Image (cartoon, rainbow, N blue to C red):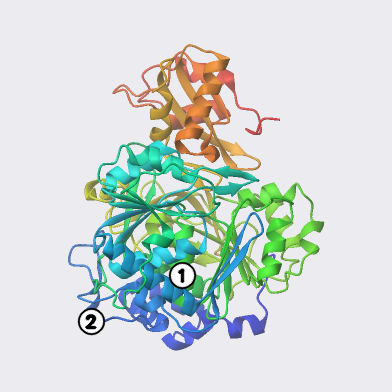
Amino acid sequence: MYAWRPAHAIRESARLTAFIQQCGAGGFEHLQRRAAADSAWFTEQLLRFLNLRFHRPYSQVLDLSRGIVWPTWCVGGGLNIEDSCRREGDDPAVIWEGEEGTSRVLSWSELGRDVSRCAAGLRAAGIGKGDAVGVHLPMTPELVVVMMALARIGAVAAPLFTGFGPAAIESRLRDLGAKLVFTCDAFPRRGKLVPAKQAVDAAVAGCPSVRQVAVVRRSGVPVDWIPGRDVWWETLLADEGAAASEPTGAEDPLIVIYTSGTTGKPKGILHTHCGFPVKSAQDMALQFDVGSGSRVSWITDIGWMMGPWLIYGTMLLGAAVVLYDGAPDYPAPDRLWQFCARHGVTMLGLSPTLVRALVEHGGDLPRRHDLSALRVIASTGEPWNPDPWWWLFDHVCQRRIPILNYSGGTECSGGILCDNLLLPVKPCGFSAPCVGMAADVVSASGESVRGEVGELVIRGPWIGQARGFWRDPERYEATYWSRFPDVWVHGDWAMIDGDGHWFIHGRSDDTLKIAGKRVGPAEVESILVDHPAVREAAVIGIPDERKGNAMVAFCVGAADTEVEEDLRRRVAEALGKPLRPERVHFVTALPKTRNGKIMRRVVRAAYLGEDPGDLTALETPAPVEEIGRLRAPQSATPV
């Protein structure tokens, strides 16, 4: 059943239609087939459409001499992506509102001035091409300035989730060998201040590579200060800006975004100047119809890939980025709709988790605000369930505008699947792969399947493809390319129905996605087993009505109510409150293979009463039976 169909006027005016006309493709289906089959042709057309400013032309758009796993894009080209993000004039480039009600606007000229001053200040501080810099900032105008300034000087940005505790920040800074970290004094959440600098101070104590901490005055509260290391934002900014951008190569590192896998340390996903920003702008323009004059907001954090995606994409397209720094339902449950109306947001991005929370406040609140500027609502983070999707479509979209569902990942620089303005929309699904993505659904043997659930894969290269993991190419190959020859296995279960619409059915690996944020179970388990009462631990995600998924931990050790609460507190302090386990169960043993590997999929299946699948590698069935007796309630959210 289709919920929304594009009117003729929408199809005719869409940027995707303009791109099809530029390509001489003759229609969307023809474009999609050719783009998936010929990545070089599609990317050449895309670079032309985005009008990127190369200071040295590339000799060929795609070199596959090292194979599909390690393509080289824009070969020999000179590209500093910040050059293509620069504009002049009084039109707004950054519109910001804080939870406390304060608003600020930076014009394109003002943004350019601040980026120049920040770039010059960083160079004066000894930061230059190839140096890694941690970015632990809330969604403020200074964040946009920092991301653009780091690109200008050729440094490598490392965004850090502002909800992280010191342990998570430290591990990432150490992995990168970061030289400088941006943070703020504190930022408000639900009327309380989150001590950002305090967390960074504790993390940096274990990071000898960090020479300086640059602090933005977000809340004006006193903070501990280390002379010679700490510097205020306004002091860092040079009086005279840096006019010239660093002449970086198109494939020089731009950003490392950390995500987590099922085992081991967090993965630093490496992207380049011609990678992540280009794919961000591609999806924003072709899927969501963003262009000059658009006002784009996504409820996100810089540590989630949608933060950098929002900044790079809007800057490249000459759109205004509209930032909200705060809880989207505070101090009143209609805060998000008030924010969109006040700033004329034309595209709003949010997660199903957020919508589930807003549903509880009723459908009349969105109607109290003028949302007539909205043209598109986008969603990502985790799979939808129908009720909140229809609530959003009925009460916010008023069946006038589409919900464009978007699914991909940090490693992809954006989407694999997405709706668009040329095709009808089904609730909770995706009308097609993103243009240029050779997506498929395959069986366990790698054969294409339709009408049944299989693995979501990609059969061809794309410009936003990760350039590996930071200093760990073998792990990157093993994670995505080891299942089938020359095929990227994404880790999602998917299905294509009889109408050609796609649906995601959750993760096919053990990675946890809690309220739209990924975390590897090993990272949480290491915190749990650090407690003297815990010998072993396993962490799983289970369905939750509000978060989409909730975290449940199983620990081997002495059961104690006080210990259970202490464990939940430790995880929240180390990784952030959104990643606090909903429950901690104590068991006598965990399901393991004969070589000692914990079988998390078996833990999850036993707890949910599902078929655990192949148990031939299981050492003993006793732990499975014990976990099964604990059986999860229907919702993980405590009443």
Residue 8 vertical placement versus 562 (above, below): below
Q: Nearer the viewer, residue 232 or 471?
A: 232
Q: Residues within 10 Å of mark 2 (few under 14, many from 20)?
A: some
* Amino acid identity at mark 2: Arg
Going 32% across and 51% down the picture, which residue do you hit?
212
Q: To which quarter of the image does residue 488 belong?
A: bottom left
Q: Nearer the viewer, residue 596 or 76?
A: 76
Q: Earlier in the sequence, mark 1 or mark 2?
A: 2
Q: Quadrant of the C terminus?
A: top right
Residue 294, percent from left and from top: 57, 76
- Mark drawn on residue 69: none
Q: Residue furthest left?
A: 65
Residue 492, percent from left and from top: 46, 49
- Badge 2 element: loop
Residue position for label 2: 56
Q: How many marks?
A: 2
Residue position for label 1: 313
Going 41% across and 38% down the picture, which residue do you hit?
166
Q: Quadrant of the N terminus?
A: bottom right
Q: Is residue 607 left or right of residue 68?
A: right
Q: Nearer the viewer, residue 300 or 445?
A: 300
Residue 557 vertical placement versus 431 (above, below): above
Separation (CA) of disc 1 from disc 2: 22 Å
